[in-house]
Amino acid sequence: MINKKEALTLLHSKMQSVNLRKHCYSVAAVMRALAKHFGEDENLWEIVGLLHDGDYEFTKTDPGNHAKLMAQWVRELGEKNEELLTGIESHGWFHEGRLPQTRMQWALYSCDELTGLIIAVTLVRPDKKLANVTVENILSKWKSKSFAAGVKREDIENCEKELRIPLNGFIDIALKAMQGIHEELGL
């Protein structure tokens, strides 16, 4: 299976936006934490999270190929792990009206939007430090649909039905994971 160093090299070769890279780092950290929570393969889940949006700069005007192109690039590196490849591809399924099928895919689907909300909450705080953000801070912005209006809260809420993690617990796992890489995120 592709390792983290190889995945980072691929991501950096295909994604120039520093902010998009930071989003991928965030999702990777949260996916690793969720894999640990479930007793799953932490490396596998982290790589899926790291590469899920890696083709965005190539597919932003062609959403039907989003995530498929990244999976193709990973295959071209010789990757044969179908769980990893399908995990990456599953990120783009919503463009086809398809839903995730596995716990890993649901974790990716649910945490992708949450990382953006956590960053938004962090950036409106006076110190802009992830270390000082709490679950309560995030939940206080949850019902304000005008705050981080692009965040699909209903996607995040799938954590309860599909992952059987209460929303506040899901936010806690994600927040702690992101706090653990705050230096990489510059927050």
Image (cartoon, rainbow, N blue to C red):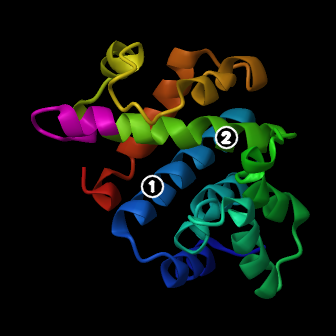
Tell me: 26 left or right of 92: left
**Which residues fall within the magenta stretch?**
120-130
Q: Quadrant of residue 185?
A: bottom left
Distance, label 1 to label 2, CA atoms, is 14 Å
**CB of mark 1 within 8 Å of CB of mark 2?**
no
- The 10 Å Cα crowd at callout 1, few under 14, some 14 to 19, many 20 or more, is many
Name the one closer to the observer, 176 or 108: 108
Q: Quadrant of residue 6?
A: bottom right
Quadrant, the N terminus: bottom right
Q: Position of residue 11 (x, y in %)?
A: 55, 75
Whether residue 39 is visible here, answered yes or no, is no
Q: Position of residue 175 (x, y in %)?
A: 42, 34
Mark on residue 165?
none
Residue 122 is a magenta residue: yes
Amino acid at the residue labelled 1 = His
Q: Secondary structure at mark 1?
A: helix
Q: Residue at x 50, y 58 (%)?
A: 24
List the residue tagged with mark 2.
109
List the residue tagged with mark 1.
23
Name the one closer to the observer, 132 or 154: 154
